[in-house]
Image (cartoon, rainbow, N blue to C red):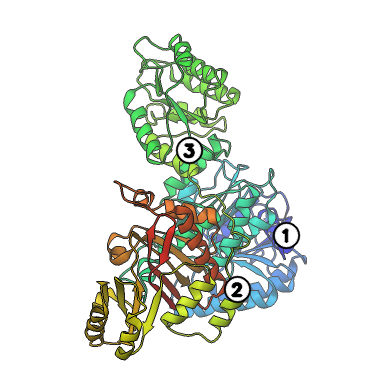
Amino acid sequence: MASDTAVIFNRIVNPKSIVIVGASNNKSKPGGSVTRNVMSSFKGDLYLVNQNAEVIDGKQSVSSVEEVPDGIELGIIAIPAKGVYEQMQKLSAKNCKIVIVLTAGFGETDEKGKAEEKRLVELANQEGITMIGPNVVGIVSPNYYGKFAGILPQLKGGSIDVVSASGATIDYVMEQAEFRGVKLQAVFSMGNSAQTSVEDVVEMLDAAYVPGVSAQVKMIYMEGVKKPAKLLKHARSLSEKGAILAGIKSGVSEQGSRAAASHTGALATSDTVVQALFDKCGIIRVRSKYELVEIGAALAALKNKTNIKKVCAITDAGGPGVMLTDELNKYGLTMPALRPQTQKRIFEHIPVFGSATNPVDCLPTQTGAQIAAVIRILNEEKEDIDAVVVLTGNSGLSDKWECYGTLLEIAKESQIPVLPLLSGITTSRELIDKYKGHDKTFFVDEVLLGAALGQISNRKPLYKADAKLANYNKATLDKIFAGLKGVVPPDTADAILDAAGLKRPQSIVVKSKAEIAKIAATVQFPVVVKIIGPLHKSDVGGVMVGVKDQAGLEAAWDKMEKINLFDGILIQQMVMGTEVILGAKKEEGYGHLILFGLGGIFTEVLKDSQFALAPLGLEESQALVRSIRSVKMLEGARGQKGMSIPVLADFLTRLGQLVTDFPQISEVDFNPVKGEEANLFVVDCRIII
């Protein structure tokens, strides 16, 4: 299947033959426009179908698909919607099995359009056709411009593939990329994604990926995640092969809250699970097309280097260097002071009132010679620097092309990547265009560049799940889960915790008041008493802490039996210490979303929580624990004992394994998990099947 997928991808981006159904001399029509664009770029066998058999731009067309040869690799349809179905049938009969449908008027319009789109999908599936569209702007590759509207990028043959659910968005990205000198390779517009979606193209990119040959950077724009499991599998596979992915998922806001029976469910949102999915795949998530292009430009200048921690800036003014430093620091990157020997050498080349620390300030009289000298010194002194940002505006006090031309040369020579920030985009427009003409990208704003470097540096690593967990008894768990449905009773939940190797405090279930006298003789007071029945115990007054004796137990029973859904009490050993929450929620198509955060009664108030997709390894679990804002509390603050992060990570890993092994679990709350240092307990456990 993978090889077939790779063949399909290669035929889409590099077909040997193309047929355009709806070719026209009228360039204001999609058929006329795409014909012109394909004819100007495609070197293979091209066939034009026009019902009047016109001569189009000097090439004779035919009046019907029946007249073209068998086995054409790619078909493009650009005719009114009512005729598309019939032409797809005819293309299939001619063994043309990849079809791009530019035509609009389908699922994006009305119920009739949706029904016709469904017919197209059924036909494509039945005939083994890969259909892209309908309602697409088209596809651009180094081999042809199969696009009827918008910009046709001139900078092709680059190292970035782009896949977009929106034709307009892909045009905006290409406009920005062209302006910034960012070279693209294949560009996919998916339109209505009726059969083939963004996720399917990611699968194709994965199947066809050859390290060192394929475009290393993949940019994705999604308006919905239709096939999350496919995206997870193939985006992660691409990342493992060395590809770098960046993406936008729009439509993140939610009207109202989701109905949920657990704290985890209440905290999880559709955007939360998308973020967890992107993190699991190693996709750098951005919010806008400008950020997407900024990431692409930065990777191009860095030659796809991603381990960026220390940056040096060479500036012609103080302010931009300060703003760059602030933005880098926000993401955990630094601009370290240069060594005294390095500073001494730099001072020999810059103005006496400049600065050689970092940023290196050459003042508004900055010259290309100064820039080159500083970069050479940084290389020669082997300063521990991962990237050099050169900020140069246009003060009118020096020859800007001398700066730009020198940047072109020194960037080739330097072992440290050089990122040029050319901020004089109005006064130096012609010079910047000349600079871009040398196939180089540039930057315009130090804050945007700093954010891009930070996002690249902080790309999530590809964690692996641990092979085996000690004291995790899968056979026992299989027996416990057999036939379980609904809210799991407390005694069964305790058995699940025990079999999963999760420590819990001593607890006793009491189903009648008469049992209390006998039980009290065996209990080590003080204890906590919790109601059995209602899901959110604290909300209904169903928790009493510090109960000291039998009389207290009986008083707790008397109070709680008046509460709706009362079904007994749980007597539990008191545990002191910090409270956190661990949880899981099943998300259709994604698997289980794992939650870690500050716990107890303030879970939903403080919302200091982070999420990841199951399963988790210990390393990923530790990273999840350390990602909450209150991590200092867990480490121990102001003389208070903290919580062992390795033990918390072990609990999270076991929870992730539990919901992976038993996908019928709907929601889980361990709230709170409580204790001091390594002596931690799941104090309250709620599992819903």
Q: Amino acid at mark 3?
A: Arg
The quarter of the picture where residue 477 lies is bottom right
Q: Mark 1 and mark 2 in contact? Answer it, CB < 8 Å.
A: no
Q: Is residue 395 above or below residue 183?
A: above
Q: Decide if residue 80 is in sight here.
A: no
Q: CA distance from mark 3 to mark 1?
A: 33 Å
650 sits to left or right of 671: right
* Badge 2: residue crowd in 10 Å (few <14, some 14–19, many ≥20): some
Q: Decide if residue 510 is in sight here.
A: yes
Q: Is residue 405 above or below residue 253?
A: above
User: Which percent across, then down, holds residue 653?
Assistant: 52, 62
310 sits to left or right of 531: right
Report the disc number at residue 7: 1
Q: Is residue 366 above or below residue 109?
A: above
Report the disc number at residue 162: none
Nearer the N terminus, badge 1 or badge 2?
A: 1
As helix, strand or loop, the secondary structure at mark 3 comes to helix
Viewer-nearest of labels 2 and 3?
A: 2
Q: CA distance from mark 1 to mark 2?
A: 42 Å
Report the disc number at residue 474: 2
In the image, 487 versus 470, the foreground residue is 470
Nearer the N terminus, badge 3 or badge 1?
A: 1
Residue where numbered disc 3 is placed: 180
465 sits to left or right of 8: left
Query: What is the quadrant of the N terminus in the image?
Result: bottom right
User: Which percent across, then down, holds residue 195?
Assistant: 58, 70
Viewer-nearest of labels 1 and 2?
A: 2
As helix, strand or loop, the secondary structure at mark 1 comes to helix
Q: Amino acid at mark 2?
A: Lys
* Badge 3: residue crowd in 10 Å (few <14, some 14–19, many ≥20): many
